[in-house]
Structures are given as C-alpha cells and as structure tokens.
C-alpha cells in the first residue's frame, strides 16, 4: 500500500497533520473521500480540491476500482451488479463506494487517534 506521494484523485501532496488512506497505486486524501461519498450518492460530477474533475462512472464502465480491483459484485442470487465508482478524469484513477467508505473509516480512526 502506498501512503506517500500525490493523492490519486486531486493530485495534491500531503499537507501537515493530514491523514490519508493508502492505496495500491497511491493514497486518497480526506477531501477526495468526502467528495466521493457525496458523488456516489448524487451522481453529480465535481471538481476536487486540486482542480481535477471527479465523475461517477456509468454502470456499464468496466474500469476496476484501484483499491479492490473489482468493478462488479455477485449478488446472493448470482446476478452481477456493477459497483458504483468514482473516477478522476485527469489522473485515470477509480475507487468504488465500498472502498470510499473504508477509506473514510480509516481516516476517521487515524484522526481520532491523533487527538487522544
Ligand atoms: Zn485528494
Ligand atoms: Zn473498491
């Protein structure tokens, strides 16, 4: 897991005291997790804090999530359901809603750990 370097979604370097979630190809910062969680809900494209464009992928897009490597999941009955994913147009990165949730949890825990 890569924790250093630029955020995979906004391209910004880590700022002091900031907790980011690691990923196989690079980290994701709190503002991109926050933007992603809103985006997977409302489907609205938005600009990241670094000025890149964040989009929700259409369900038929086969771009796999950078974090978990999946783009669909098998349901209980064996149907394939595409995962809701956020993509950064400029940086070509993809993350699914489940991995955004996990990244958010990780960042929250890390932030709390620092306060106590
Ligand atoms: Zn970012
Ligand atoms: Zn994922």
Image (cartoon, rainbow, N blue to C red):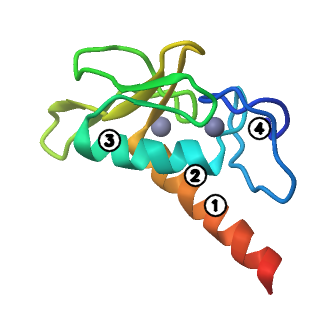
Q: Is mark 2 within 8 Å of ligand 2?
A: no
Q: Residues within 10 Å of mark 4 (few under 14, many from 20)?
A: few
Mark 4 vs mark 2: which is more N-terminal?
4
Q: Residues within 10 Å of mark 1 (few under 14, many from 20)?
A: some
Mark 3 vs mark 4: which is more N-terminal?
4
SS of the residue under disc 3: helix
Per the rendering, the mark at residue 40 is 3
Q: CA distance from mark 4 to mark 2?
A: 13 Å
Mark 4 vs mark 1: which is more N-terminal?
4
Evaluate if marks 1 and 2 touch, with contact meaning CB atoms under 8 Å apart: yes
Name the residue rendered at 24%, 43% in the picture. Answer: 42
Q: CA distance from mark 1 to mark 2?
A: 5 Å
Q: From the viewer's perspective, is residue 72 above or below residue 116? A: above
Relative side of 61 to 78, left or right: right
Per the rendering, the mark at residue 103 is 2
Evaluate if marks 3 and 1 touch, with contact meaning CB atoms under 8 Å apart: no
Evaluate if marks 4 and 1 touch, with contact meaning CB atoms under 8 Å apart: no
> Nearer the observer, disc 3 or disc 1?
3
Q: CA distance from mark 3 to mark 2?
A: 14 Å
Mark 3 vs mark 2: which is more N-terminal?
3
Name the residue rendered at 49%, 45% in the picture. Answer: 99
State the residue position of label 1.
106
Q: Is 47 or 43 nearer to us in this picture?
A: 47
> Nearer the observer, disc 3 or disc 2?
3
Counting from the top left corner in percent of width and height, residue 102 is at 53, 54
Name the residue rendered at 57%, 34% in the picture. Answer: 67
State the residue position of label 4.
1
């Amino acid at each position: 897991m890569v924790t250093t370097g630029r955020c995979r979604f906004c391209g910004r370097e880590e700022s002091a005291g900031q907790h980011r979630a690691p990923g196989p190809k690079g980290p994701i910062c709190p503002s991109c997790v926050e933007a992603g969680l809103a985006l997977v809900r409302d489907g609205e494209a938005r600009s990241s804090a670094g000025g890149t464009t964040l989009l929700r992928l259409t369900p038929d897009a086969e771009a796999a999530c950078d974090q978990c490597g999946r783009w669909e999941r098998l349901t209980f009955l064996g149907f394939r359901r595409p995962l809701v994913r956020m993509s950064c147009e400029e940086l070509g990165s993809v993350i699914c809603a489940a991995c955004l949730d996990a990244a958010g949890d990780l960042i929250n825990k890390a932030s709390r750990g620092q306060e106590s």
